[in-house]
Amino acid sequence: MVFVASELTVPTAVKIVIAGGFGTGKTTMVASVSEIPPLRTEELLTEAGVHVDDLAGIEGKDTTTVALDFGRITINTKVVLYLFGTPGQNRFWFMWDELATGAIGAVVLVDTRRLDSSFPSIDFFEHRGIPFIVAVNCFDGSQNYTVDEVRHALDLDEAIPVVLCDARNRESSKAVLVGLIQHSMNRLAAV
């Protein structure tokens, strides 16, 4: 069989970063929406991290991402989304620049029980001019807040979308990604 160059189509790769503080649900979001079994680099939390990892509010957590999570969503023959979940702990932040390079945008996943862990992620994308949205992961048993209350607590500009989600739910996670892509495209069109 002879292939003609015009018959071969290489899809456009679209890179999205799923970021946030420790224990906000990044690994869960990538897994819920990926069409492939996600690549995970999770390891058990150990005694060595007791004085480093703040488990307040997430006492049942027993694993942590030590490098990245990776997932894929094929939109069509021309576009493929690649999802890169960041590690949440400060000691792994040296990887964030590499993970964010070439991304069209980021989802900053937040947990209202530990809202203070969101500020470093927001600052990271603001300072680099990378479009991002804030997705509030609505954990079971956590207090519900409105989008406006979260926006105010995080001191976010009105131009930054804030959405509520359940990172365990595929449709909810897809809606977050659609919102990010729309936000990124709108920012690009405004330039």
Image (cartoon, rainbow, N blue to C red):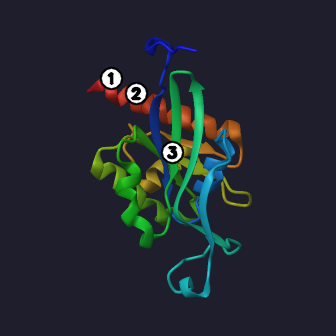
| Label 3 vs label 2, nearer the camera | 2
Residue underneath mark 3:
148
Q: Which mark is residue 121?
A: none
Q: What distance separates the C-alpha of mark 2 from that of mark 1?
A: 6 Å
Element under label 2?
helix
Task: Report if the CB atoms under discs 2 and 1 are less than 8 Å apart.
Answer: yes
Asked which secondary structure carries label 3, the reply is helix
**Circle 3 crowding by C-alpha within 10 Å: few under 14, some 14–19, many from 20:** few
For residue 185, the mark is 2
Q: Nearer the viewer, residue 169 or 34?
A: 34
- Residue 168: tell me if it is visible: yes
Three-letter amino acid code of the residue under disc 2? Met
**Dot 2: few (<14), some (14–19), or many (≥20) neighbours within 10 Å?**
some
Q: Would residue 68 appear left or right of 169 to someone viewing this image?
A: left
Question: Cα distance, mark 3 to mark 1?
Answer: 26 Å
What amino acid is labelled 3 in the image? Asp
Quadrant showing the N terminus: top right
Task: Return the residue at label 1.
Answer: 189
- Tag 1 or tag 3, which sits nearer the N-term? 3
